[in-house]
Image: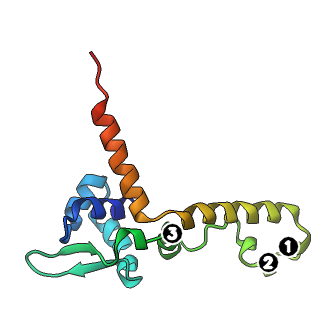
Amino acid sequence: MRALVDIALHSNGGPVLLKDIARRQEISPQYLEHLVAPLIRAGMLRSIRGAKGGIALAKPPEEIRLSRVIEVLEGSVAPVECVDNAGLCARSEGCVTRDVWSDIKAAIMEVLESLTLRDLVDRQRAKVTSRSETYSI
């Protein structure tokens, strides 16, 4: 998620170098490459080759839902496997704790579905602005 925000903030209409994202986000370039590949396959990012190449958003930030990013990178947000696959446990149908886990998954998905990359970019800009406005004497 941080890499996507970084790309949105630093693209200025063009591609961003992976090494620059990795440096700013303090993550290894190899790990970043591991994250970027599925996002390219999912159509959220595009890779641009050449001297002025790098990674760019393939869609406007307001079209990239956080729920889709998590789905692509992590899969289900269910806290336990039986939420997505009741057949894993003979007790699933009558299990009250499974109901709680299902509610938790639904709440997480509601938040993720309600937010886009644009929302995160706007929040990040607001945080930077509010930090630069504070001072001490």
Q: Residues within 10 Å of mark 3 (few under 14, many from 20)?
A: some
Task: Tell me which amino acid carries mark 3.
Answer: Ile
- Residue 51 against residue 98 in the figure, above or below: below
Counting residues from the start of the chain, the first of labels 1 and 2 encountered is 2
Front label number (1 vs 3): 3
Judged by depth in the image, the label closer to the viewer, 3 or 2, is: 3
* Residue 44 pos. (x, y %): 37, 77
Left or right: where 74 falls relative to 18: right
Disc tally is 3
Which quarter shows the C terminus?
Answer: top left
Q: Which residue is mark 1?
A: 92
Spatial CA distance of label 3 from label 2 is 22 Å
Judging by the rendered image, the residue that carries numbered circle 2 is 86
Residue hosting label 3: 70
Give yes or no for contact between labels 3 and 2 (Cβ–Cβ under 8 Å): no
- Sequence-wise, the earlier of marks 3 and 2 is 3
For this view, does 92 lie left or right of residue 27? right
Q: Are marks 1 and 2 in contact (CB under 8 Å)?
A: yes
